[in-house]
Image (spheres, rainbow, N blue to C red):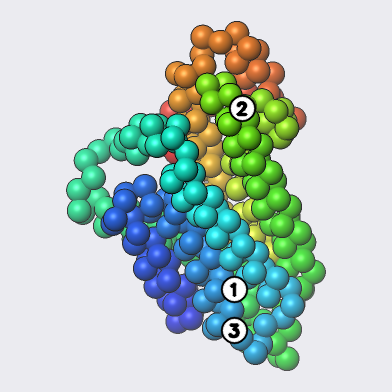
Amino acid sequence: MIVPHEILWLLLAAAVISGTGWFKFLYFISVGYGFSVAGCGAVMLVLFSGRMPPGCLLLCVLLIVYGCRLSGFLLFREIKSASYKKALPELTKTSRPVTVPFKFIIWVSVAVLYVMQVSPVFYRLYNSAAAPGGIPVDSRWAYVGAAVMAAAILLESTADFQKSRAKKENPRRFCDRGLYKLVRCPNYLGEVLFWTGCFLSGIGALQGAGQWIIAAIGYAAIVYIMFGGARRLEIRQNKNYGADPEYQAYVNKTPVLIPFIPLYHLEKYTFLKG
């Protein structure tokens, strides 16, 4: 499988931006994550400027909006939220010492993962530029994917707003209003939807087994990570609210991540790592 040299620019951008994790380890997978995705979107705009189909332009813009919104929110919460600052030591605990070699492995791994996640958009651009007239085989899926990605951004933004407002009113109570009546982790649901849209955007453009494998691994990995994150959140909330009868009633009737699917608990699934 030949890797286009243009994708190395995306890898460089992801590596530089996610390198903020050397300053604070959590940033490898939080602030550095969102800004890396945005950076990849910006790099694609530059690489393929002048030969950018409208659907691809929309996809790149959505990657930038998504990444900047996510990392901007995380930074704002870290600076402004006293409860988050208090919980941060527990959130940043790792199962092994954070040595320099370990940091390096994480750094390289996340940079590669972020590029794999955005690869459906990259390959649509790359294959479109190489096609006769610069027209992709089927551009309709670009708009389908973009619609799902836009809906996901709206869902995540709404969920974050609803939880922030609920915590301001009662910092010691779990959130069960708005989207949290639908699922317990609507922001993680938004993540899954966003990357589902990104993956869908590659249909009609991805060519050959290699491109499909890269895109599929990136998508499967982020879905796995989101389920792991939901499990980790469930464990933490069980510790904080487990003795509350209202919380027990809430978790036993509200799906953890996927609406209308009766999957209420993830704690027992130890293969999930968040």
Q: Which residue is mark 3?
A: 48
Q: In the figure, is residue 22 to the left or right of 7?
A: left
Q: Secondary structure at mark 3?
A: loop
Number of residues whose C-alpha sits closer than 10 Å to that of mark 1, classed few (under 14), some (14–19) or many (20 or more): many
Q: Secondary structure at mark 1?
A: helix
Q: Label 2 sits on what residue type?
A: Glu
Tell me which residue sits at (54%, 50%) in the image.
Answer: 73
| Residue 169: image tag | 2
The answer for how far apart the CA atoms under marks 1 and 2 are is: 46 Å
Q: Quadrant of residue 63?
A: bottom right
The answer for how far apart the CA atoms under marks 2 and 3 are is: 47 Å
Number of residues whose C-alpha sits closer than 10 Å to that of mark 2, classed few (under 14), some (14–19) or many (20 or more): few
In the rendered image, which quarter contains the C terminus? top left
Mark 1 or 2: in front is 2
* Residue 167 vertical placement versus 105 (above, below): above
Q: Label 1 sits on what residue type?
A: Tyr
| N-term-proximal mark, 3 vs 1 | 3
Tell me which residue sits at (45%, 25%) in the image.
Answer: 236
Q: Which residue is mark 1?
A: 123
Mark 2 or 3: in front is 2
Mark 3 or 1: in front is 3
In percent of width and height, residue 245 lies at: 60, 8
In percent of width and height, residue 225 lies at: 49, 43
The answer for how far apart the CA atoms under marks 3 and 1 are is: 11 Å
Q: Work out whether residue 193 can be spotted.
A: no
* Residue 49 vertical placement versus 213 (above, below): below
| Residue 46: image tag | none
Q: Label 3 sits on what residue type?
A: Phe
